[in-house]
Image: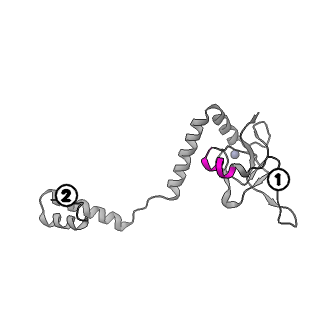
């Protein structure tokens, strides 16, 4: 079965022999499913997708197929789950997408957010952690009326932001 609004996609393109022209690899490998679901797919990539020839993407432009793998060739045909080379994970994903596109999109967004958090984790340095521990100790002492701790805490905060430190 073919899935409208999708593209069959390949992981890699190749250079035509002796030229700089991009072409399809002799061994194309698995056919993945590209499902446009993001704003950028619609407005940035969408107008570039060719309907009569493959669309080649550079490394930095690679898009994720439904299975999560990066693809650099969008073929001018719909993903077909009866293609013997169809990626089994993409077959499962297009089924889920066709069943409930909104839920699928939400799941994709969650995966993307998780990838982003893994790539750009908030890392506290040892100094950050130490100063947090120091502040906790000062706060505890200030709670007990330690005037020195109160003065030190006041020094940590700019004037006008000392509520509750008096
Ligand atoms: Zn796939």
Q: Position of residue 81 (x, y in %)?
A: 75, 37
Is 155 included in the stretch rendered in magenta? no
In the rendered view, would you say 105 is above or below 12? Answer: above
Location of the C terminus by quadrant is bottom left
Foreground: 152 or 138? 152
Q: Position of residue 160 (x, y in %)?
A: 23, 61
- Label 1 environment density (alpha carbons within 10 Å; few <14, some 14–19, many ≥20): few
Q: Is residue 62 left or right of residue 25?
A: left
Is 41 included in the stretch rendered in magenta? yes
Q: CA distance from mark 2 to mark 1?
A: 67 Å
Q: Which residues are magenta?
A: 37-45
Q: Secondary structure at mark 1?
A: loop
> Pointer 1: what residue?
27
> Pointer 2: what residue?
140
- Label 2 environment density (alpha carbons within 10 Å; few <14, some 14–19, many ≥20): some
Residue appearing at x 53%, y 58% in the figure = 119
Residue appearing at x 22%, y 68% in the figure = 155
Q: Position of residue 35 (x, y in %)?
A: 67, 43
């Amino acid at each position: 079965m073919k899935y409208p609004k999708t593209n069959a996609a390949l992981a890699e393109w190749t250079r035509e022999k002796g030229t700089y022209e991009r072409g399809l690899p002799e061994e194309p490998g698995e056919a993945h499913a590209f499902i446009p679901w993001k704003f950028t797919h619609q407005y940035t990539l969408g107008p570039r997708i060719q309907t009569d020839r493959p669309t080649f993407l550079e490394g930095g432009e690679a898009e994720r197929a439904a299975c999560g793998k990066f693809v650099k060739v969008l073929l001018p045909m719909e993903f077909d789950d009866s293609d013997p080379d169809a990626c089994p994970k993409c077959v499962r994903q297009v089924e889920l997408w066709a069943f409930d596109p909104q839920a699928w999109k939400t799941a994709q967004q969650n995966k993307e957010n998780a990838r982003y958090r893994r790539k750009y984790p908030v890392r506290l340095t040892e100094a950050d952690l130490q100063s947090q521990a120091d502040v906790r100790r000062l706060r505890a002492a200030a709670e007990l009326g330690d005037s020195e701790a109160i003065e030190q805490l006041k020094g940590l905060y700019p004037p006008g932001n000392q509520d509750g430190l008096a």
